[in-house]
Every structure is written in structure tokens, then in C-alpha cells.
């Protein structure tokens, strides 16, 4: 049994959302494997369950703020049937300390509040289909509070800066359509997987793969260490989206040549 979702591999948020999707599938149904197919626009997961079951479980699972005195950057934990899945990569001080630079939210944006809003919004039927990563909605917490997303989804970044649209939606506290599945699943995917740093500041590479892989092998595949399994490379920028140079956004990626150069 398997399920598939449509994906734009040039959208780094969607790419890492696929990594998060496989992470969750393996926790529900041990032994799950995932791969990109059809020249990358489709991500498939082989497992003993369905996409609808996974999304329903994700919307129902408890989400806990581990650092109660830090609603803005506090660590998060998913439990229930997913076990104790801790999301804290933006606090990493070990060998992956550089991954903290991928944190896109800042200021009054809340790590936990955004996660809860994205999770709550996944209750709608369109998030149980192959168009999961393309479904957009304004996101609300269970208490009815509107929340803007993290800005992992590359469709939001180009419209976030005042020089692009003539004013700053962020500065005006405007609420716009988010892509909740991309935002939450990307947050989850980055816990295990990280793009490869380049020589340029805030510029990263990532690679798809075309053979079924278990989550344990994803860090190697994503960073381009498994080029023999039909991988394709992409390069993106984690871009400052406001004039204060605090808030960031993932920008659309550029395909790399087979040698990894633009």
C-alpha cells in the first residue's frame, strides 16, 4: 500500500514537508519508505496506512510547549501515536548548530502558537488529498486566533517585502492565506533533515532521491551524499523578508546541474 502527494521540488518548504510526511508515516507504520518520482513532482510513501489516516492522526495528536516561559522560540513536542517527537532544531548547539540559521520566524511570532494554528487548520478535507501541499487557508488556533505562518513556503516570501508589493504586509499585521500542511510538515522535516550549506551566506542546497528510502537515510540523501539513486539538486536562499532583517522566508529554489553547479 502507498500514497502520493503532488509537490513542487523548487519550493524548499514543500520539499522538507515531504521529509516530515515520511517521518510521521514511519512513526505510525514502522518501515515506511518514501521517494520522489515522475521527474520529482510527486512524492510517494510506501506504508500500511493512508494519507487521510496520517493527517487525521496529526490533527488529533497532543502538541505541547516544552518551554512554558518562552512562547516565541520554545521547543515543541508531538506525542500520541507519533511517540515523543521533539521539535527543537532551532535550539541545536551540537554538530548541527548551523541548522538554527534556518529559523524564519522572529519577534512576536510564536513557535508553539503557529504550530497549533497550522495543525488545527489541517482538519479540512482538502488536506487529506494528493493536493495536501497546495491547499491554502487562513490559519486559526483552536481558540479562534488568526496566525501567520512560519514562512517556510516559498510562495509567500516574494510578497512579504515592501519593495515587492509597495507596502509591508508584515508591518501592517495583515492576515493572508497560508499553506498549513507545508508549514507544519516542514517544521517536522527539518528536525531530522537539513540542507547543505554553500560558501554563500544563507544559501543552501538540497537533493531529491528516486529510490525508496527509510527516514534514517534522509539526512544523507537530502545533503547530496547519495547521488547514485537518481537525485536532483536545488539551491535556495533563506531571505530577509522585512526591513529589520530579523524575519526570514524560504525563497524558490533554482535547479542545479548534475555536477551541483548552477
Image (cartoon, rainbow, N blue to C red):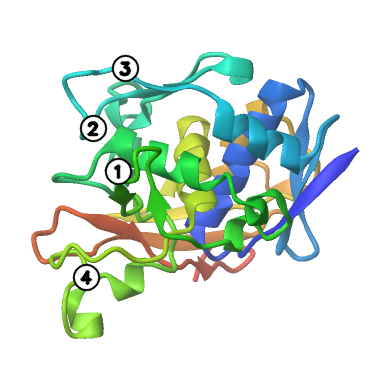
19 relative to 25, above or below: below
Of the numbered discs 2 and 4, the one sitting upstream in the chain is 2
Of the numbered discs 1 and 3, the one sitting upstream in the chain is 3
On the image, numbered disc 2 is attached to which residue?
A: 73
60 relative to 18, above or below: above
Of the numbered discs 4 and 3, the one sitting upstream in the chain is 3
The residues tagged by marks 3 and 2 sit, at their Cα atoms, a distance apart of: 10 Å
On the image, numbered disc 4 is attached to which residue?
A: 169
Q: Residue at x 60, y 51 (%)?
A: 124
| Residue 261 seen from this side | yes
| Residue 220 seen from this side | no
Quadrant of res 142: top left
Residue toward you, 61 or 82: 61
> How far across and how far down the image is residue 29, in percent?
77, 23
The residues tagged by marks 2 and 4 sit, at their Cα atoms, a distance apart of: 22 Å
The residues tagged by marks 1 and 3 sit, at their Cα atoms, a distance apart of: 18 Å
Q: Residues within 10 Å of mark 4 (few under 14, many from 20)?
A: some
The residues tagged by marks 1 and 4 sit, at their Cα atoms, a distance apart of: 20 Å
Residue 103: which disc?
1
Q: Residue at x 20, y 35 (%)?
A: 72
On the image, numbered disc 3 is attached to which residue?
A: 66
Q: Residue at x 83, y 32 (%)?
A: 47
Left/right placement of residue 240 relative to residue 61 reads left
Of the numbered discs 2 and 1, the one sitting upstream in the chain is 2
Of the numbered discs 3 and 2, the one sitting upstream in the chain is 3
Amino acid at each position: 500500500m502507498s500514497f502520493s502527494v503532488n509537490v513542487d521540488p523548487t519550493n524548499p518548504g514543500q520539499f522538507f514537508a515531504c521529509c516530515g510526511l515520511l517521518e510521521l508515516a514511519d512513526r505510525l507504520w514502522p518501515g515506511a519508505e518514501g521517494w520522489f518520482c515522475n521527474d520529482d513532482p510527486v512524492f510517494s510513501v510506501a506504508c500500511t496506512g493512508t494519507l487521510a489516516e496520517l493527517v487525521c492522526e496529526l490533527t488529533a495528536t497532543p502538541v505541547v510547549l516544552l518551554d512554558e516561559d518562552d512562547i516565541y522560540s520554545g521547543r515543541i513536542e508531538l506525542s500520541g501515536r507519533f511517540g515523543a517527537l521533539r521539535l527543537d532544531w532551532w535550539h541545536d548547539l551540537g554538530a548541527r548548530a548551523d541548522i538554527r540559521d534556518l529559523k524564519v520566524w522572529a519577534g512576536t511570532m510564536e513557535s508553539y502558537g503557529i504550530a497549533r494554528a497550522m495543525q488545527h487548520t489541517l482538519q479540512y478535507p482538502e488536506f487529506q488529498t494528493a493536493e495536501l501541499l497546495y491547499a491554502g487557508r487562513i490559519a486559526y488556533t483552536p481558540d479562534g486566533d488568526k496566525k501567520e505562518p512560519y514562512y517556510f513556503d516559498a510562495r509567500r516570501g516574494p510578497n512579504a517585502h515592501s519593495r515587492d508589493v509597495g507596502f509591508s504586509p508584515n508591518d501592517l499585521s495583515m492576515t493572508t492565506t497560508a499553506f498549513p500542511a507545508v508549514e507544519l510538515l516542514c517544521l517536522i522535516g527539518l528536525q531530522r533533515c537539513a540542507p547543505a550549506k554553500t560558501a554563500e551566506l544563507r544559501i543552501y542546497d538540497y537533493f531529491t532521491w528516486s529510490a525508496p528510502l527509510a527516514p534514517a537515510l534522509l539526512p544523507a540523501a537530502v545533503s547530496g551524499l547519495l547521488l547514485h539513486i537518481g537525485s536532483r539538486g536545488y539551491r535556495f536562499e533563506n531571505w530577509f523578508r522585512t526591513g529589520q532583517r530579523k524575519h526570514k522566508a524560504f525563497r524558490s529554489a533554482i535547479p542545479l546541474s548534475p555536477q551541483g553547479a548552477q
